[in-house]
Image: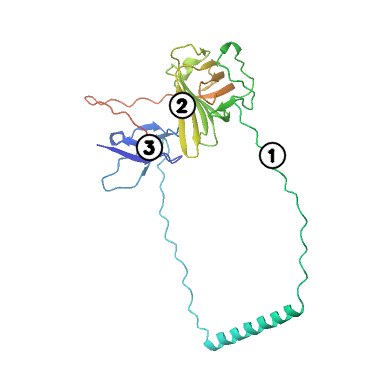
Amino acid sequence: MGDFKFACPVCGQHITADSDASGSQLECPTCYRKIVVPQAPTAAQKFVLSASEVGKPRPVHAPQPPTRLPQPAKSNTPVLIIALAILLIGGGAAAFFVLQKKNPPPPKPQPDKVEVAQKKPEPEKTNTPVSGIEWKLDLSDAKIPDGNVSGRIHGRDFNYERAILQGGQLSLRHGSGGTTELGVGIYLFAKAGEELSGQTVNIDTNRARGPRVSLRWKDGAQAHSQNFTNGYAMKLEFSTATNGRISGKIYLCAPDDDKSSIAGLFDAEIRKPVPPKPKIPGQQPKPLRPKAPK
């Protein structure tokens, strides 16, 4: 068949998928909401389709009727009335000019000189976040503060607002609503979140390959990410999972140029992993290929 584009109903992200993937589910690469791939358009359709969020009806946009501008009313003013009005306006203007010439207005007072305060220079950006976490690739000195997870990602202050553990993927997000302004994703070797109950993960910089760590940030509407499988230092401790939630502690320092680092406590929601799409006998499944807009 072929590829086609559709928009995420939550954040408007354009996604490209194969037409055979219509009706399947995927996670939006920008807002991480579960959406259903819409039916592929016909050759005559040129517009971008809109997907629907999983468990919610597809949004319908009703066309707005065209706005009609009011027609100016026809003027039936006689020519004589218009001429008389012009004469009255001209006479009033002449009288005003004569009065102004006889009684000139008083001079305007000169404003006092106002000293302009000099703008204070902005403080230079550093790699130490507001929480006081120091970037070190050494777990022997790793100290996890008692407060919520905070730090710096890509040179910007990070304070986690939401944590999700889905399968073996732990996501810590900073952002309002469904938008993820800053985020950290850690891909652990587990099929379900409950398997990590009571576990501790220590990764030092000498390890050849560890769980993938993904740093995510946005510049305006453009989403970016940077992944690491080694060279970072991480200490991750999970408590016992109860009632669909699991708390924990984290210390993470990444080897990026901005020296990203986070540390603190979190409380994550445990979600079930997305079940794989059933295989059709005799047919090789085609993977979804979400693409970010250029």
**Is label 2 or label 3 in front?**
2
- Name the spot of residue 161 as percent of width and height, x first: 57, 30
Question: The N terminus lies in which quarter of the figure?
Answer: top left
Position above or below: 104 against 167:
below
Give the mark nearer the N terminus: 2 vs 3: 3
Q: Name the element at disc 3.
A: strand
Q: Is residue 191 above or below residue 23?
A: above
Q: What residue is shown with label 3?
A: 15
Dot 3 amino acid type: Ile
Q: Quadrant of residue 52?
A: top left
State the CA–CA distance, disc 2 to disc 1.
35 Å
Pointer 2 with pointer 1, Cβ within 8 A: no
* Circle 2 Cα neighbour tier, 10 Å, few/some/many (<14 / 14–19 / ≥20): few
Q: Please name the amino acid that badge 1 sits on.
A: Lys
Give how far apart the Cα atoms at labels 2 and 3 are: 20 Å
Q: For mark 2, what is the residue?
A: 226
Residue denoted by label 1? 120
Residue placed furthest toward the left:
282
Q: Which mark is on residue 40?
A: none
